[in-house]
Image: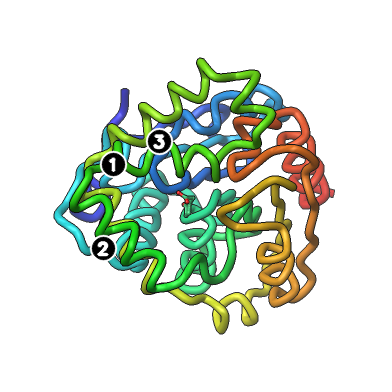
């Protein structure tokens, strides 16, 4: 287990692969920790320098009282990469992780060589929907929204056939520090990267599960259309977490994109 004081935020992180490999950095979604990538990482080509971390208020990383701004998450990731001596990374962001990735590419282009935006958008949800979620958690705790979140995270087929796994993911979500979860809700609520997305100039692959109810395919496609030169790929089957539900196809698409960068 490795912890780092990244610009004043103590973050849990993992680095795998050779020091000289192309850095590929993974940013997790709301209510998940770095285990969300476990199933797909062994399917990626060897030789990459894989960096994962738990964003503030999640996993083993330090939590702070809400609210958070997206700039807080972006600054944490920038400090993590600066401390590791990493620049020019492929940044793979899932949902809020994709917002963090867009914010990093906009504010610290030296750190980002390319983006994989997975089940994410330039803007996710509405202020009303995030305020309603925060209110529900303040009154009933994370447990009270657990079932509804699982319906957005996973397809009906996965929930039926992989009920034991879904319980584990649900436990991960409801055991997230409440302030960390709500802080990240406020960060998402207050973020619209429409202008930043249109100004991006790095190779970008946008992916989305065909059964994603949180960031539906049309929303992800619309964000990809804002980003000059971005490619959109639909992954048939999964909900909001393709690395969990469709690790083979997700890894194949990420590996193909990375291979194209190295040609
Ligand atoms: O929890 C959800 O509804 C899905 C989600 C939205 C933003 C994020 O990171 O996950």
Q: Say which residue appears at 18% left-offset and 51% top-offset.
A: 139
Locate residue 145: give its quadrant.
top left
Percent x, y for residue 1?
A: 31, 23
Front residue of 150/262: it is 150
Q: Say which residue appears at 24% left-offset and 55% top-offset.
A: 7
Q: Say which residue appears at 61% left-offset and 52% top-offset.
A: 213
Q: Say which residue appears at 53% left-offset and 66% top-offset.
A: 102
Check disc 2 and report the residue beneath it.
Answer: 68
Locate residue 130: give its quadrant.
bottom left
Percent x, y for residue 233?
A: 80, 53
Q: Earlier in the sequence, mark 3 or mark 2?
A: 3
Front residue of 52/143: it is 143
Check disc 1 and report the residue beneath it.
Answer: 142
Secondary structure of the residue carrying tag 2 is: loop
Percent x, y for residue 93?
A: 55, 51
Residue 33's label in the rendered image is 3
- The span from disc 3 to disc 1 (Cα, nearest Å) is 16 Å
Q: Is residue 64 left or right of residue 150?
A: left
């Amino acid at each position: 287990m490795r912890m780092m004081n990244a610009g004043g935020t103590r973050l849990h992180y993992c680095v795998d692969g050779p020091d000289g490999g192309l850095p590929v950095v993974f940013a997790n979604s709301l209510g998940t920790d770095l285990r969300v990538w476990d199933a797909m990482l062994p399917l990626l080509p060897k030789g990459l320098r894989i960096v994962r971390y738990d964003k503030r208020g999640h996993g083993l990383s330090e939590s702070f009282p809400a609210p958070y701004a997206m700039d807080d998450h972006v600054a944490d990731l920038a400090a993590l990469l600066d401390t590791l001596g990493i620049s020019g990374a492929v940044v793979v962001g899932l949902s809020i992780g994709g917002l963090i990735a867009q914010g990093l590419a906009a504010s610290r282009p030296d750190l980002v060589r390319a983006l994989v935006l997975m089940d994410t958008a330039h803007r996710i949800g509405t202020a009303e929907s995030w305020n309603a979620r925060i209110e529900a958690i303040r009154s009933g705790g994370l447990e009270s929204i657990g079932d509804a979140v699982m319906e957005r995270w996973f397809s009906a087929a996965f929930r039926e056939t992989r009920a034991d796994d879904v319980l584990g993911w649900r436990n991960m979500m409801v055991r997230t520090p409440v302030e960390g979860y709500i802080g990240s809700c406020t960060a998402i609520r207050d973020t619209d990267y429409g202008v930043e997305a249109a100004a991006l100039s790095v190779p970008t692959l946008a992916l989305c599960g065909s059964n994603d109810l949180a960031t539906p395919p049309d929303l992800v496609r619309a964000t990809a259309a804002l980003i000059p030169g971005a490619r959109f790929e639909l992954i048939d089957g999964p909900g909001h977490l393709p690395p969990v539900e469709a690790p083979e196809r997700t890894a194949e698409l990420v590996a193909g994109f990375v291979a194209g960068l190295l040609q």
